Image (cartoon, rainbow, N blue to C red):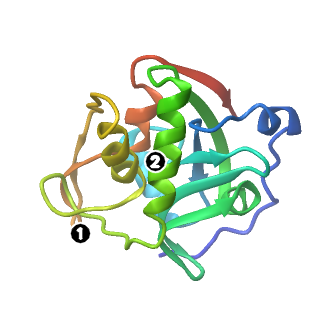
Amino acid sequence: MRAPVAREPLRVPDEILSNLRTGDLVFRLGDVTDSRIIATATNFKYSHVGMIVRERPLLVVHAVTGEGEREGVAAVSMREFLAHARDFGAVRMKFLNEGQKARLAASLLKRVGEGFALRPRGEANLYCTTLLEQEISKITEFSPQYFELNLAVLGGEYLAPKAFWHYGDVEILYER
């Protein structure tokens, strides 16, 4: 179920990447079947989200499973993040100031190495969106919208990347 789909590498214009800043959220539709299932279930074009924690070179922190030896919270280059992408987008969280974004980046980096846990709301979980939700909530009031999932293997309320893309006071920087 996790086999990557053969494809050409995703190309994101350099001018887009050079304008990304610490605190910007980066989204992708992954290259595995699970990603297409998530995108379909949430009615959204992206299935995964991470955050820029360093600008030069671009470094992304995200919680991931099934990407080679990476499992859990990882800090990866933008190139590595895009290596598993079929589509890409980015937003800027305008509801956080620069100091808050710097604190958020530092707190995310401290979480690198923690394990991945895809479980519903109310249970101990740690996946791409809940990692961000947990850390943003330590800085400011933050209440993204969960969605109900009813699949044979997963059920309950989950937080999807769509909730961050459509959250109030975000600026869409790029979408493909």
Residue 123 quadrant: bottom left
Q: Quadrant of the C terminus?
A: top right
Task: Give coordinates of residue 19: x percent, y percent.
Answer: 77, 31
Q: Which residue is mark 1?
A: 153
How crowded pointer 1 is (Cα within 10 Å; few <14, some 14-19, many 20+) is rated as: few
| 140 horizontally vs 113: left or right | left
Q: Which mark is residue 30?
A: none
- Helix, strand or loop status at disc 2: helix
Residue sticking out furthest to the left: 122
Query: Eyeballing the image, is 153 above or below 121?
Result: below
Which residue sits at x=72%, y=54%? 78
Identified by mark 2, the residue type is: Ala
Q: Which residue is mark 2?
A: 39
How crowded pointer 2 is (Cα within 10 Å; few <14, some 14-19, many 20+) is rated as: some
Identified by mark 1, the residue type is: Val
Residue sticking out furthest to the right: 14
- Helix, strand or loop status at disc 1: loop
